[in-house]
Amino acid sequence: MPTKTTLSSCYMCSDDCPISVVSDGDRILSIDHPKCVRAEGMLEQRESPDRLVSALVRGNHNEEWNDVSLSRALDTTAEALLHIRDRYGPESVAFAIGFTKEVRPYLSRLARAFGSPHYLTESSCCFAAGFVAATITLGREYEYFLGPSRRRCPEAKCRLVWSTTPSGSMLPYEEHHLYTDASSVPTIVVDPRRTDLAELAVVHLQPRPGTDGALALGFANVIIENGLHDKPFLAKHAHGFEEYSNYVAGFTPQVTSQITGVPAELLIEAALLYGKSRPAQLTISPSSTTHHSNGIQAHRAVLLLPALCGNLDVEGGNRPWRKRLKERNVNLSAELPASDVAPMGQKEHPLFVKYFGEAQGMRLADAIESGQVKAVFSIGLNVMMWPNSTRLARALKSLKFFSISDFFPSPTIDAATVFIPAATHLERQSLVVNPYGRIQYRPVAVPPRGDAIGDTELVFGMAKRLGLNDMFWNGDIHSSYDERLEGTGLRFSDVPFDGTPILREPDFGLERSYETLGFGTPTGKVEFVSTELESLGTDGLPVYEEPFWSPVSTPEIARDYRLVLTTGGRSKNFMHSQGRALKTLLEREPNPRIQIHPSDAAVRDIVGGEWVEISSPLGAVTMKAWVTDIVPSGVVHTVHSWVGHDINEIIPDEGLDPISGFPPLKSSLCEVRRIEPPTS
């Protein structure tokens, strides 16, 4: 049999970079991919001997697994879901997905067709809070603020980079323009840690984790006091500016310094540089400012800085992506009536559900413990994504039914009653619609190992077994692609079947389009005071509040847990937990580590490379100490999503942001102590 070359895409992260795969039958000979560490693990991800490639079924999580055929596992799943629906109603079943994101359109459709309002994704703690914050503050055209904020704008006279580090998360990593341009474009970095990008910055501000909102208000104070705000723009296009101006007057550099720990003179220097530079670009993370108990308001405070200085919708500033590639929503929301039962989290976080269109999954343990949810069908779900993650693991084990599809053994699988082996991206087809301007059909490069099944095929197969085949294009996946492509001007027949991508340049349209279109908020203006928040009885200003646990808000906890804990800094080696079962990547980063300042390590008799225990009132986990002044004294930083060393076990799930429902993963409290090495 001759060798075959398949044009494909890499899904070791969600960038979906084009690759080519040379294979001989079911054997991969080589993969050509962009220069990326994560991509080096994709072959092992497919071929690892530790990968689970057989379907498994058991009566409950305490029983031994039984190998069954894939067909039998799917039948068992459908029978259980139908039985629970008939007895308790469709709202008793939740449909949940972590990574992959590719099958989201179909799982959302399956939930609605089944009659369940409880469709939830990893967006319950990733990206969505920034989406909501931008929407209610700047309007729907700015909902995707994140992507354009990261594009290279040669016109920018200054860049304000708020808690994001390309070398750990954004291709091409160290060759990203934020590094290569830093010598010619004055760069301000806001990050509690002294990152590699911070080393290149003109000014580096290190706020205490969880105080970003106060720092942004301090920026505004300096800008307004020095008359650097764009008065004509604000007079015509701002709602509530006077009230906002009066509020930020209290955040003088000295007051802001007391809250954040940032020296007043550095704050003044940074704010004057940003305020005087026209245009200036804000680059922001999707999660760093929102993983806090007051994250939405903090994110809003940061987003208002471009508006304050007239840097919206101008080249070199922050533009809305009005004409980005966007596939049609196929979740049946227009065709089927909504459930009479509200999605989980709607009562507590109505704007999250309204604008992001899904349940707030951080409320899953509540829904299970209350008896509202009795079964969960999931793809790629990861309990380590939740704060107080052991609580969710216990809740999942109490369900009448819980299925999971994945690649490798995990704590989530430990709680399941049905396991369905997942095909890797090299073994499954997909339609890639990248908002940055690429449409690509990804064909199957090599056959799935064992009984592994593609995520789309899994959902379509479940739809057929649940009697919903007529709502799933009668099983024709390629017909579904036609519907998803509506709005792009293409049909699936226009997309090369061999995997060749169609590329389109992003179109941002005319500058200052708000002059004729306004802003897509209720007032048609930038809402310094949010009318949506006010209508819900919440303060419309981007008010600052202390983190749920902090030395200020909970001094009684801080007496015993003296260090501020922040988590989740990105690593180029892993996409969250994905890849941590791969020796190829573990060789580069073999252990979970905690960064601790030399002075904090010294008083605790901690030496770098030793095992330590990190504890909070919720429990304790172990990691290796990395003694470094990357973190300031009094602050420690840990990685996340390591099996057996799950830092989220000790982060409270009570301190969810009231607007978004996001957890306080990046501002908590802990203590660290030296321990004997754990036995293997």
Image (cartoon, rainbow, N blue to C red):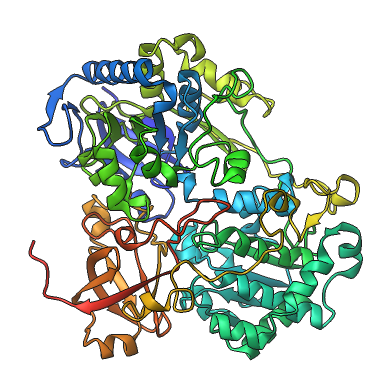
Instruction: Identify the residue at image location x=47%, y=13%.
Output: 476
Q: Is residue 8 visible?
A: yes
Instruction: Identify the residue at image location x=51%, y=61%.
Output: 293
**The quadrant where residue 68 appears:** top left
From the viewer's perspective, tell me whether residue 236 is left or right of residue 465: right
The image quadrant where one finds the N terminus is top left
From the viewer's perspective, tell me whether residue 123 is left or right of residue 272: left
Q: x, y (%) of residue 427? A: 33, 30
Q: x, y (%) of residue 447? A: 29, 26
Q: x, y (%) of residue 26? A: 25, 28
**The quadrant where residue 254 appears:** bottom right
Q: x, y (%) of residue 538? A: 66, 56
Name the one closer to the observer, 27 or 675.
Answer: 675
Q: Is residue 98 visible?
A: no
Name the one closer to the observer, 450 or 69.
Answer: 69
**The quadrant where residue 556 appears:** bottom left
Instruction: Identify the residue at image location x=12%, y=72%.
Output: 677
Would you place residue 4 above or below residue 468 in this image? below
The image quadrant where one finds the C terminus is bottom left
Would you place residue 607 above or below residue 301 in this image? below
